[in-house]
Image: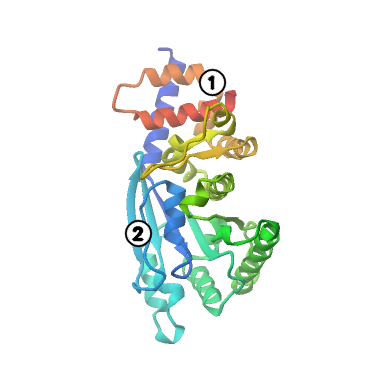
Amino acid sequence: MSEKQKKLKETIIHLQEEAKSRTLTFLLIGRTGTGKSSTINTLLGKKIAPVGSTEAVTRSVEVYQHEIHGMNIKIVDTPGLCDDLPENGRDEVYMQMIKSEVSEVDCLCLVKKLDDPRITGDDLRTIQLISQVLGSQIWHHAVIVFTCADTIPPEKFNERLAVRTDLVRNAIKKVSPEGTRYRTIAATAISNHEATLDTDKGERWLTELYITIFNSLSRTSVIPFYFATAPRLVTQKKKKKRKKNTHAKNDEAREIVLRTEDEAVIKKKFKRHPILRTIIKAGAVGVGTAIAGIPGGILSGVIAAAIESIMTLFTE
């Protein structure tokens, strides 16, 4: 193995270690019954967060940790924050609970129902508390997720999504400190019903959720997210070559079908990552040789497959 290949091998091992050393943290904000748990389970392809009734049973912060393909995932749900009354004086307690569980948030998911046209006082209070305690920079890596997308008539869907998105964005601006600057917070819609996810529309909504989350992540957190989900990614071109469509069964994770424009989003993000730039520049053959030279056990098959999928994006 040449010196160049040895350095590339070390780079790939470093990328793996960097990804595995991180805990990818999602903070879920929204009232009980909006579908926060179902949404995160759909996104990650695992039943990490339990799905309960629409009644607010627990008045505390819920933390769920899971490992997906060697990547550490942490879900922090806040059922009590939006559901409690301000006069009960529990806001400060909830926020201290959140701070004790969260040292860094990779993605904040603000979850609302698409068929709910209101921005309530609870919503404003929650947004303000999050900004005050975790800092306005929290919104730099936030997404707005609307659930119950299948309840909106197709002819009204785009308009409803645009109107609801503006309402939530304006609410965030309204309670943010004057002069606060942050990127435009992206929004997406999803239906977590199995029957809907089996349709072309449901499949597209899942992909849009994935890409929206992917694009919101920082340079360092996007790698473990990709490694955790790479086995589920399939290009639209490859899917069309199949003789028939396949749907997830039982506990199988659903495929995430990438169109050309989705692949472009991923490629753009990866080009900005210094380690990935080195790997991509080496080309598929060079990377394959480097991986082959890594002793078994150091580089897991899943991560090797993820790197291979990255190379495929840049060679097809």
Q: Is residue 218 left or right of residue 173?
A: left
How is the rendered protein coloured?
Answer: rainbow
Choose between 224 and 260: the one closer to the eye.
260
Mark 1 highlights which residue?
Answer: 283
Residue ranking furthest to the left: 297
Q: Is residue 128 left or right of residue 56?
A: right
Residue ranking furthest to the bottom: 87
Give the vertical position of 153 relative to 121 (above or below). above
What x and y, as percent, mark residue 95? 41, 71
Q: Secondary structure at mark 1?
A: helix
Q: Which mark is residue 256?
A: none
- In percent of the image, x 61 and y 67: which residue is there? 168
What x and y, as percent, mark residue 60? 34, 71
- In percent of the image, x 42 and y 79: which residue is there? 84
Give the vertical position of 135 relative to 6 (above or below). below
Mark 2 highlights which residue?
Answer: 50
Q: How many marks?
A: 2
What x and y, as percent, mark residue 37? 42, 59
Distance between the Cα atoms at labels 2 and 1? 42 Å
Closer to the camera: disc 2 or disc 1?
Answer: 2
Q: Is residue 105 visible?
A: no
Q: Is residue 55 visible?
A: yes
Choose between 90 and 62: the one closer to the eye.
62
